[in-house]
Image (spheres, helix red, strand yellow):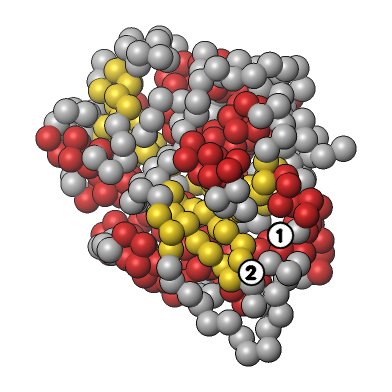
Amino acid sequence: MPANRSTLLRRGIAALAALPLLTLAACSYGSESKNDTSDAKIAAGAKKIDGLDSVKIGYFGNLTHGTALVGNQKGFFQKELGATKADYQLFNAGPSEIEALNSGSIDIGWIGPSPAINGYTKSDGKNLRIIGGSASGGVKLVVNPKKIKSLKDVKGKKIATPQLGNTQDVAFLNWVAEQGWKVDAQSGKGDVSVVRTDNKVTPDAFKSGSIDGAWVPEPTASKLVAEGGKVLLDESSLWPDKKFVITNIIVSQSFLKEHPKAVEAVLKASVETNKWINGHPDEAKAAANKQLTSDSGKALPADVLDPAWKSIQFTDDPLAGTLSTEAQHAVKSGLLQNPKLDGIYDLTLLNKVLKAEGGSTVDDAGLGVK
């Protein structure tokens, strides 16, 4: 890992001040947004929290959103919400989830760092808060081994990322720059051709030879491996302690202010889910796949599911310092104009839950509500 990365991590983004010009999208995989009609059983005699009929929860059909998948499938969220219904909605991309949060179509959501950064800064810090972590890792550079045998061979090749300015696109552009290569961020043209391709079609593009590799999240990365690809680089190897945020939990600020007990219940369920996932990895993997099947109508085969699940770490820590670094990478790439992220985190309720569970509290890297 280049020495300047850890330096960036320590410095944070204190000097950043303006708004981004580019809409950043989340990594996407799965169906378009839709209401999930599945209901976990509500215990007899259970009471509504904060008088709410429901709490509307959004997530993606990605394994990196495994906390939400497993929490839904195993009923953890419904258990903590009592007679208040856990009402789920599935999304395919970050901008649509941010729009749903802004409109009140959802209250809480699992989402990647780039759309969270963009949503927060575009609203002058008035629409959302990051209230917890969910996952780290699960992103890989997978290549055609016949065309690319080493990292230096990536130069001159066509590499896919999910979307212009999304979390993986920013990471790849930053990695390219650290190799000393030049790429125009907007067009994707340069020493490497960056091809923005939806994760749903990337495996077909790889199979047809129209791309030589891809920097993508799971399960897309493992789908490419199943098609004959080779993992050339795991992004976690570029980060201190091999950890970086890939999924956070966000909430609308109005919902957080008006219904803190409901937010605390969801966070408690998230902590319980992550504990169960880490204590029962095989059962959790099966539960996540079962929920994916329910949401999309198609299960992941074992040769995709097993390696994909193994590469993801589920954590309550939002890894706030790495969010700061990812924002700086976007600025360096020319995709973002100096975002001001002061106040993007409010970890008060999460730390309350963690303390009650006897766990260690987590840090907001100086970007919390003052």
Badge nearest the viewer, 1 or 2: 2
Report whether residue 110 is seen: no
Q: Which residue is at the far left? A: 208
Q: Which mark is residue 263?
A: 1
Residue drawn at x 52%, y 13% as measured from the top left: 334
Question: How far from the left and from the top, in percent, is residue 367?
Answer: 77, 35
Q: Is residue 59 left or right of residue 364?
A: left
Q: CA distance from mark 1 to mark 2?
A: 14 Å
In the displayed structure, 185 sits above or below 164; it is above
Q: Nearer the viewer, residue 42 or 153?
A: 42
Residue drawn at x 49%, y 53% as measured from the top left: 59
Task: Give the class, few, some or many, for how many residues have Cα within 10 Å of label 1's Cα (few <14, many ≥20).
Answer: many
In the displayed structure, 260 sits above or below 157; it is below
Q: Quadrant of residue 309?
A: bottom left
Q: Which mark is residue 358?
A: none
In the displayed structure, 183 sits above or below 194; it is above
Q: Amino acid at mark 1?
A: Val
- Count how many numbered circles sit on residues in the image: 2
Q: Is residue 317 left or right of residue 25?
A: right
Earlier sequence position, callout 1 versus callout 2: 2
Q: Nearer the viewer, residue 229 or 81?
A: 81
| Residue of label 2 | 53
Residue drawn at x 77%, y 35% as measured from the top left: 343
Report whether residue 156 is seen: yes
